[in-house]
Structure formats: structure tokens, C-alpha cells
Image (spheres, helix red, strand yellow):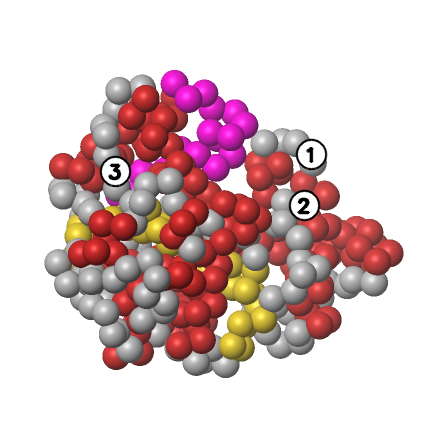
Amino acid sequence: MNIQRVITPRERIGKVPDKLFLFRSCTGSMEYPGTENGIKEVLKILGVEVVMDPDQTCCSGYILTCSGYKPEPALAVTARNLGLVEQRYDGLDVYAFCNGCFGYLSELTHILNQSQSYKDMSNQLVGQWGYHYQGKARIFHVQELYYQLIEKIREKVVHPLTGLRVASHYGCHYLAQQYGILDDGDLPTFHEEIIEALGGTPVFYKERRMCCGYAVGRGFTHKESVVQPHLARKFDSAKEEGVELMTTVCPGCNVALDREQIKLAERGFGPYDIPVIDLGQLIGLALGVPVWKLGFNANTIPVDGILSKLGLGKGD
């Protein structure tokens, strides 16, 4: 088997799409709706039309990871969601902005496409409601498209992030991929390249590859006594390097890294006071998306200081 490990964005995606299907994240919609809106605004500036559908449901990955049910229901949910895209928006690829959604969709479609029995089982179930999965839609993460369009992003910067020290959190669900990836998971740099294109200063901190420790773990299975010291170690590392802002590409990671800072302080860690936003929101700031469209009022750790440093106000 000859499968290339690291490939270019063009090899991964091909031609830049004129239109794509944006897969809604339940965590993003409920916790940080500004992430979704920021992505739509950025893609509009970059000339890519975004399509969404109210009938799309959760990817079902959270409960599957917790062994809340067997894999068969999750396979059927995936077949329904992607069957919906194939039937209503034939030819569009699916782009996730949540590492969890991206990971589960990629894994589950691989199973469906490799196992005719699972594919038949899933289609038999969802066929009762008029859906049918063929396996045509490809799965990408929106960050991959950002990287492919990095030069266009650089050209469209209107508010350069001059002097802003930004740390990246890639997230384990994305870095866990083994083949056909944009960067080596052991030492990725493509987020930092995007930050540089925006005029910011990327910060390489020791624990930048460390998992957020949250998602299913913090929510369902791991105690605070395990996750919070883990997070404190990550933030200690970031603070030592003078990080002013941290970016994610997963709303679940946002929940951990933003919401937990208050609880960390209550346990005697920090304080850190490092705002955490989605990479799409950061690109949006630099490309001139109005601040009020980026939904920063949902953040636990305020971004006011960052906006002030960039000469922006919440009403801009």
C-alpha cells in the first residue's frame, strides 16, 4: 500500500470550490455561534458560497465515543446526513469546522465505503425517511481550505494583527490522522503560517499539541481532578511564552480552553485570562468582518483587550 503521508492543500482538496456544504456543529451552534457565522463571513470574502441545511443533524460522535450506543446508529446518522447532501446539493463537498465532526465523519464514511453490509444496513434504515447514501461527498475541514487560500487571505487583510502574540491549538482529533494530511502531526506549522499571513506573531509554546482534555472526556467520563491540572499545564506553558490569544479549530476545544479558565482559577491555577477564539474568527478580524458578527459576547474570557490592541471596538 503506497499512501502518501503529508500532501499539499491542492493535492488534498483539488480545485478551490465555488460552493461548499458547511456541516453545522452542535457545540458550535449552542456554545459559540460566532464561530459558525465568522466562517461564513470569511468564506464570503474569499469568494466561496456556503450552503447549509436545517435538516442536518448532529454527527452523533459524542455519544458513540462514550459507548452510549453501538456503532450502527452512528453509521446510520452519517448515512442520513451525507445522503441529504448528496440528494439536495449534488456535487458539493462537506466541510466541517469542528475537529470532532471532521473526525467522526471521516471515520464513519470510511467504514460505510469499505463495508457494503454496513452501507446496506444504514441505507435500509434511513431509506424509510427517503434518504440514500451513495458515498460521493468528500469530507474536509475548513482549516484546510484556509491554508489552500493563504495567499488570497494575505492579500485581503485590512486589519493586520501587528504585535499580537497568538498561540495555536490544533486539536487531537485532527492531528491524529495518519495519511493524506497537510502537515506532520508531530510538529505542525500551517496554523502559524496563517497567523503570519494575517500580520500576527505565532507563538510556539511547549504544550501546543496537548489535547484540551475536554470534549467527551470532561463532559462524561473524566473527573475535574484529572482534566483541570492537565489544562493548567497547557496554559502555564502558553503564559510562559507571553501568549495573548489562543485559537482553536473546534468548538469543543473552545469550551474547554475558554470556559474552564474560571474554574481553574477557583482551584488555585493561574489566573491565565487568555482569550480563546476560532481560527475563522481571527481571520475574520483581520479581513474586516464587523466585530459584532463574530459573536465574541459568547466568550467567558473577554476579548476586549485584544480588540483594543487592534484598534477595534465591539460595535465595529
Measured as percent of width and height from the top left, residue 293 is found at: 42, 63
Is 209 magenta? The answer is yes
Residue at (62, 38) in percent of width and height? 64
The amino acid type of the residue labelled 2 equals Ala
Task: Examine the rendered structure and indicate whether residue 301 appears above or below residue 286.
Answer: above
Measured as percent of width and height from the top left, residue 203 is found at: 17, 50
The residue pinned by badge 3 equals: 273
The residue pinned by badge 2 equals: 74
Q: Between residues 195 and 112, which one lies in front from this camera angle? A: 195
Q: Nearer the viewer, mark 3 or mark 1?
A: 3
Label 2, secondary structure: give it: helix
Q: Quadrant of the C terminus?
A: bottom left
- Residue segment shown in magenta: 208-225
The amino acid type of the residue labelled 1 equals Tyr
Residue at (48, 59) in percent of width and height? 36
Residue at (20, 68) in percent of width and height? 160
Q: Earlier in the sequence, mark 1 or mark 2?
A: 1
Is 300 magenta? The answer is no
* Label 1 Cα crowd, 10 Å radius (few <14 / some 14-19 / many 20+): few
Measured as percent of width and height from the top left, residue 35 is found at: 44, 56
Q: Earlier in the sequence, mark 3 or mark 2?
A: 2
Measured as percent of width and height from the top left, residue 110 is found at: 59, 55
Mark 3 and mark 2: span between their CA atoms? 38 Å
Residue at (21, 56) in percent of width and height? 308
Q: Nearer the viewer, mark 3 or mark 2?
A: 3
> On residue 113, which mark appears?
none
Q: Which residue is the extreme one toward the front?
A: 315
Residue 151 in view of the camera: no
Q: Are marks 1 and 2 in contact (CB under 8 Å)?
A: yes
Label 1, secondary structure: give it: loop
